[in-house]
Image (cartoon, helix red, strand yellow):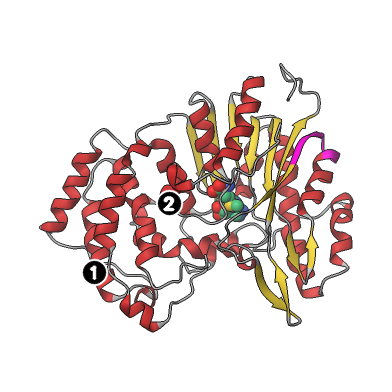
Amino acid sequence: MLDDIDFKDYKKKDDIHGTVLYPAVMVAPVQKKILKDIISKNKIVSIFDPFHGSGTALYEAFEISPEIHLVGCDINPLANLITRVKLQGVSQFIFRDIKKIEDYIKKPDGIYEYSFPNIKKWFRPDITDSLALLRTAIMDITSDRNRLYFWYILLDVIRFNSNTRSSTYKLHIKENDKIESMQNTVIDMFLSAAKMNVNKFKHKSDNFILYKNDIFDIIKHFRKNTFDISITSPPYGENATTVPYGQFSMLSLYTIPEYDLELEGWELDNYSIIDNRSMGGSEKSISLTDFELSLIKDYLSLISIRKQKKVIRYFKDYFYFLRELCRVTKKYVVLTLGNRTVDRIEINLVEITKKFLEKNGYKNISSVMRNIPRKRTPRVTSNVYQKPVNSMNYEYVLIYEKNNVTPDREFS
Ligand SMILES: C[S@@+](CC[C@H](N)C(=O)[O-])C[C@H]1O[C@@H](n2cnc3c(N)ncnc32)[C@H](O)[C@@H]1O
């Protein structure tokens, strides 16, 4: 089914996924190839991505077949906004609204000042002024679809014009001279991106539901066998030491007015709250079964007590999630995974997951390793006992089928 999935020549900038930056996204053509193959051989009514991030898999599913019902979940309101905009696109009056913003910028009729904790650290004063002007112009747009598209376009503009370095997803302040010499491109970058990308958003899916929630609060409410395919890429460890999706998002979340974000109410409390509440970030009252413990105990014996606690906390969440995923999926589970290193010990999430799925009623259709060609997370991430530690350089795609499902045709 998956012979070559490297897609070395794939350039994100050519499709909708290249219109915005989000950490650790899946590779769209890989997901499309898998989904196309499954959809061509089975009657697929619904697809679920429990950690949808920037919506790669859900959008690709929509492109293949707009009739399929899509359900996604993510704890991060920025992921929710990005995926919503990719799926719902813009209205036919988008050019009129771009012109309206241009006119407002030339002749503003008032500006809503805005602020958030530590704004002066992350934006130069002239950048804050330009953002406040643009933000006011966008707030004046009445079409919800177009207004959300404009916030979406603003995301990369915010990041590019902020004082944080582009080399990492963490908020990490640039050197002073770099901050001072930066050009203010807020307005120009926004207007040209809004015009240049609009053709990629001239579609509309009416067939999706996105939950801006912790998946642990949501998944338990779905009935057994609700989704024909579950396709996702879960976090490989707790956000704080792997990928800080929340921290990456905060400057944008503080800039977009709250009424245009899906919020439960706690998300803007501080810069680390989304990461702390994400998978593996906080202790829940979940226990591991003996089988689950047996899958990780050899790794635990090789790492420090302090790190053991974090690893156990992550796996309590991960196994609970997998248990529920097995229950709510009717036909196929497709996972993109990576292995991570703790105290120089590689925790083989891929093997652990395979064993779990095989024990829980699924059989392997395909498992492929993929080289990750370009990564913002450096290949060597940190030093432990003065020795460099490798980060994840490969990702793996696992396709599992629920036992007793008979596809109409065999997989090639
Ligand atoms: C690897 S990323 C998914 C990337 C996505 N596949 C894409 O292509 O953009 C993992 C996502 O899981 C989300 N996440 C982490 N913990 C979560 C939780 N407890 N509930 C829901 N989403 C969570 C993060 O916010 C992040 O967007």
Residue 247, image x, y percentages: 51, 65
Q: Is residue 169 above or below residue 29?
A: below
Most extreme residue toward the front is: 9
Magenta-highlighted stretch: main secondary structure? strand
Q: Furthest residue to the top? A: 408
| 110 or 350, nearer to the observer | 350
Is the residue 200 above or below the residue 320 in the image?
above
Q: Tell me the SS state at disc 2.
A: loop
Please tell me which residue is depicted at 73% across the width and 25% down the height of the picture.
411
Viewport quadrant of the C terminus: top right
What residue is pinned by disc 2? 20
Disc 2 residue type (three-letter): Val
- Report the span colored magenta: 358-367
Q: Which residue is mark 1?
A: 129
Where residue 368 sits: x, y (%)? 73, 42
Front-lying residue, 324 or 351: 351
| Marks 2/1: CA–CA distance | 23 Å
Sequence order check: which comes first, mark 2 or mark 1? 2
Residue visible at 68% across and 58% down in the picture: 393
**Residue at coordinates 73% horizontally, 67% vertically from top-left?**
310
